[in-house]
Image (cartoon, helix red, strand yellow):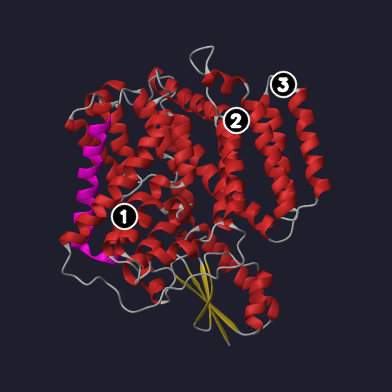
Amino acid sequence: MSWKDEWKWLAGLAGAFLALFYLPVGIPRFDSAVLEGLHLAKSYAQEHVILCLLPAFFIAGAIGVFLSQAAVMKYLGADAKKVLAYGVASVSGTILAVCSCTILPLFAGIYRMGAGLGPAVAFLYSGPAINVLAIILTARVLGIELGIARAVGAIVFSVVIGLIMHVIYLREKGGQDGTRMMLGDEDGMRPLWQNVLYFAAMIAVLVFANWGKAQADTGIWHLVYASKWIITAVSAAGLGIMLVMWFAVPALKVVTVGAITAVFSLGFPHTPMVGFAVGVIGLSYLTSTQEGEMQEWFSGSWGFAKQIMPILFAGVLVAGFLLGRPGHEGIIPSVWVSSLVGGNSLLANFVASFAGAFMYFATLTEVPILQGLMGSGMGKGPALALLLAGPAVSLPNMLVIRSVIGTGKMVVYVSLVIVMATISGFLYGALF
Amino acid sequence: MKKLQILGTGCAKCMKLAANAEEAAKKVGVDYEIEKVTDINEIMKYGVMMTPALVVDGTVRSTGRVLTPAEIEVLIRE
């Protein structure tokens, strides 16, 4: 036997032994923190997976397959009009950055081969915050208000930060080295109105299935709430018709799936999740057994699910363990949290955005972490500050950014992000 | 001798593309060499922004997509 190969085993076993030997079970704080982690994971599984995450994966997959990224990139090329470039860069994260690992190459590309430093920075800042999955989950878990504030804040401040960077480095001609952008082929896209209707149907399913109960028992919002499943069903049926008419899915298959879904929905009228889950399985069947773009849509969506679900659940467990559910304590005392980032002082906002800037959040895990922090007494303003600064920069991606634009610009960018996030958090906390 | 390069910063899709390329090259049965380009500045030199991308003998053949082994086979045979 050779220690060269065996030491890893020994270290692993010894580590596991020591961890178990000193395992702090029985200490109430630890025990309840473990339970909190499990409780939080359970509540995510019950409340957010079927009605929210599953349709969101299908929407994200559809964006990747059916919307032309190349068409968007045209507006970020070297010859693009500057004003337009800033506008497009600040919102295009929704379409281009469906996954966080695509942001850095696009950023480097816009900087090196395209519209230059300002638009590249605007894209880098807003991209992670406005990708569809992030907006949907933020709005669902943390409230629609914070979801919208996150998206709007990211878009507005991305332009501001981009412009400031551009002005500071005005004299520099940018890193353009004459390489031409390779834009993927723009294959035969369907007309815009068809795309609009198709995405509208999917978004309607997502929004109405998750429609919250209104406070009053009368009025328009209550009416929407009372008929939300009818609206959801009509939207889903519309989607089915579109699949037959524009995407060449056999009508017989779609009708069969629709009928089975209807049977389950009517059979379990008090647990609409059953019907919804059957519908999702039906859609997976329809898309995965069809050649061509339907299959690409499915594999795109499935890819997101595989990539995001495990990390998200691990994140939820850890967030629950550390911070507890709202109203309960995890391993970290709530007093610490509320004394650091409670209320809406400038300092609290600064601490939140500074910590967020250096912390690494795996895709979407910022949401459960923030939920825990807010439950432990974090103010709304600092919460937004963390949401804005957190996913936009982290220690690992600072290193990549540095290799693209150099140390000086990287430091200026990170400082701007922290300052801007602090200000926007402060304003939001003061207004709402 | 075919030179296949996979451009990508190391996300799951890039690994998948590399595996598919390997599978396709084995099936065609030519001499081949696979190289993973992970440095972002190197990737930019190819003009590629949508990763993963596949480069065959120095020419970019696909960007932003994970090609299936069958699709890569066609590119190798050309």
Q: Which mark is residue A313?
A: none
Q: Which residue is mark 1?
A: A122
Q: Name the spot of residue A370 as percent of width and height, x first.
A: 37, 32
* Pointer 2 local density, CA inside 10 Å: few below 14, some 14–19, many at least 20: many
The magenta segment is: A404-428
Residue count near mark 1 (Cα–Cα under 10 Å), binned few <14, some 14–19, many ≥20? many
Q: How far apart are labels 1 and 3 at the CA level?
A: 47 Å
Q: What distance separates the C-alpha of mark 3 from that of mark 2?
A: 14 Å
Q: Are marks 1 and 2 in contact (CB under 8 Å)?
A: no
Residue A98 vs A81, above or below: the answer is above
Does the segment drawn in magenta span residue A413? yes
Q: Main secondary structure of the magenta part?
A: helix
Whether labels 3 and 2 belong to a single chain: the reply is yes
The residue lying furthest to the top in this view is A217
Q: Look at 42% across and 36% down and name the residue there.
A: A367
**SS for tag 3?**
loop
Q: Quadrant of residue A123?
A: bottom left
The residue that mark 2 highlights is A209
Q: Quadrant of the C terminus of chain A?
A: top left
